[in-house]
Image (tube, rainbow, N blue to C red):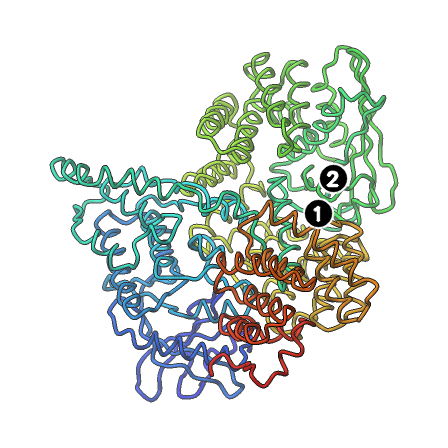
Amino acid sequence: MSEPASFIGETIGHYRVLGKLGAGGMGVVYKALDLTLQRTVGLKFLPTDVALNEREKESLLQEARAASALDHPNIGAIYGIEETSDHQLFIVMAYYEGETVAQLIGRGLPTPSQSVDLVLQISRGLAAAHARNIVHRDIKPSNIIITKDGVAKIVDFGLARVVTSSALTQSMHISGTLPYMAPEQILGESLSPACDVWALGVILIQLFTGSHPFFRDNAAAMTFAILNQSPAGIESMPPELCAIAYRALAKQAENRYPTAKELQGDLEPLRFPATTGAAIGPNEATRTNMLTARELKHYAELASTPRWAGAAVERKAPRRSLYVLLVLLLITLAALLVPQVRTRLGAALTSSSSAENHIAVLPFDNIGGDPANDALAAGLMDALSGELSNINAGKQTLWVVPASVVRSHKVTDPAAAAKELGVNLVVKGSIQRTGQDVRLTVDLIDANNLRQIGSVPLEDRTGDIGTLQNEAVARLASLMKIKVSAEELRATGGRASPAAYELYLQALGYMQRYDKQGNIDQAISALNDAVKIDPQFALGFASLGEAYRLKNQVDPQHEWVEQSLANLNHAVEVDDRLASPFVSLGRLHTSLGKHDLALQEFQKALAVNPRDADAIMGMASAYEHMGRLQDAEANFKKAIALRPDYWDGYNSLGFFYFRQQRYPEAIAQFRRVLELTPDNATAYSNLAAVYLSLSDPKAQAQGEEPLKRSIELSPTYAAYANLGRLYFTQKRYAESAQMSRQALELNGNDYNVWNNLFLDYQWLHDDANIRTTRTKTLALLEDYVKLHPQDAEAHSTLSNLYAEEKEKDKAERQIETALALQPTDGSVLADAAESYEDLGDRKRAIEFAEKSLQNGDALDDLQSRPALQALLSDPHFHSDPKR
């Protein structure tokens, strides 16, 4: 499809395009004039990267027909579905002037009366759809338009399922937008109207609190929260709405309102005063509370009971898309382990003579190798990076790569820093401690030509590491021609006693791997001792608050939240010139779903340091999860504008576009990253991940070169595994086997890669290796299903292996278990077909093969299975699921 702007002013069929209304994951919408009927309409074109086959086009037409039959005042009217001369499908919709619920919430919370009325209108529209067995699947604030007359209109009925299944999640059978997806959507189960009820429950809470009840910093944590944790913020809502919200958000679909009609019935009797913020009258409140107290307790329990403990991290994607997701998973895990990695992943290429230098502090050497000093050396790297960043808050002459990024890239030498991080300056140092005598050496190196610009040897016989560090920063600044005053050095956290500062550095070392058992507790203990020694140590209190925040991330407890808040607020009381406590407060509120409070804290951080990337990215993330996508995009772009030659800004914007399924824009951003850091292996993996997520095999093929380049720069298990799977889909079995073997050399414990290699050998008729790989895959799978009994696809894959061995009883038990867990999963049904084919039951094999196609599996999947080749030629097998 042409660039969106090119349609403006054009005539498409009998529609004159007047302007662009918006764009998102589901496509681009234009305002147009129907020249035949002389009325204003909306034209929605599908995303440019979505290529629908004939079956998907027919599915879209069916969805549009069903939606157009919903003649209801709260459902956006669909006039038809048409096609351009170059076969680009577009939907003709009614045009409504107004704003979305996302924009409404972004402006400020409506009154209670307005909120209840709005949810009632949405529930009425959904109830009409549910009465005709139509499920929206993607209810969210941006899919609800409020007209100028105050009428709510639900749009995009059915579009999410068709477009999403055609693109990113085709093999996952998941449609929807993560923050509003019900547990059964995330788990890929069959859907009912209860999934729309769940999304409406989330919107109800947002309208009253301004916060999302399950918002977390990243997709993995949010997924876990939706599946396992209680919704946040409900307690602050009017009591009579709490039971309704809890019931709408029950983890099990059968415990929710079965359709929107039942939720509507509970909402109808409620009447709120029109005054903003007004509470319900005392007598009415007492009566309502008496009626709902028992229900409230009951539904609160249903909304708090985990769906499946650990399901979010244990469930894997279907095999066809496993390796695409693996690239993204590794990136997500990096963000989980090191929070700062989201905000700065590298620095752009510049020369040492440029006006704005990009610098990385490399790990400090522990001279003498005393293990007692390991944490001290590690913490010094973080502290020095932070102090260099803080002194330059307003000078705009220096960008410091966060220590977390240096560690995540495993950069230990200047040449690697220039190549992978794009820096032009490197600080390399060492620390030696003998009793109280501390020797600190800091070298400033030109990363491009590896020339040492200067060396700073320092010594203190009283053990005052803080004084040595301040002196090192001052000397480094001088070498870079940056003027630093004594006051600026003090403003980086305040002076601390030598003993307190040493404990602080040790704590920073432990916090680098806060996920490792015992580390976060050691950090908290050291920081508590530090602030007891020096009660005016602001940076110590800020770090203690951050440590408790990280502890709550690992072990969610209200106690840790309270401790984090108390220490962060005290750090601000001691010294409000630090941005870090405000950033930590923003992250804490974000994790609790309190986005309005989070935004306030990030704004305070920016008031201290207008160029604080952590605060800017924090605001962008909060806006995104509030549905304020324009504000989110604006903040991602603001980060780029502040440092246009720093590649992480483009990287973050690329991931934003990827999450919004704006794939061409995501590709453009990742290509910009590679222009700035052409030797960045991770950036090539990111680019490949976008290509591999597309449904068009030709587009997927474009992921090959970036993956090969990523491997050339830095061989990784994920890159080899992805490339192997890509070759398999292209029937390049020898090359696929080679890549899978390379992946297994780096990680030999993933049964999926072993199974992929097993299939390669089957196609290659390599009998010598078939049995070896089958035996290895079988052993790994048997162990895996013991630990992951809810993983349907693992059971169905195990059934295939047992069937290959003609172990009929074992094979049937496994496939029965898989079908009990996921009776409508296309991939599981295809596995059932394969198992029964190997067991000699052609009739049942055909039955399950046809069911797999009827439930969304692709014929390509069946054709890729060596065991099903004879079945596919059987005249009794019908590949058309609509017959």
Q: Give the residue drawn at x 65%, y 50%.
A: 782
Q: Which mark is residue 360?
A: 2
- Using residue 291 as the reference point, say whether residue 791 is left or right of it: right
- Using residue 157 as the reference point, say whether residue 349 is left or right of it: right
Q: Is residue 13 above or below residue 581?
A: below
Q: Which mark is residue 198?
A: none
Identify the image quadrant of the N terminus: bottom right
Instruction: Give whichever of discs 2 and 1 has the lower sequence position.
Output: 1
At label 1, which amino acid type do we have?
Ala
Distance in Å between CA atoms under marks 2 and 1:
8 Å
- Using residue 516 as the reference point, say whether residue 719 is left or right of it: right
Q: Give the residue drawn at x 53%, y 56%.
A: 817
Q: Tell me, yes or no, whether the two marked residues, 2 and 1, touch with CB atoms within 8 Å.
A: yes
Q: Is residue 550 above or below residue 754?
A: above
Q: Secondary structure at mark 2?
A: strand
Q: Secondary structure at mark 1?
A: loop
Residue 871 location (% of width, % of height): 62, 78
Residue 571 location (% of width, % of height): 51, 24
Q: What residue would you read off at disc 1?
A: 347
- The image quarter containing residue 533 is top right
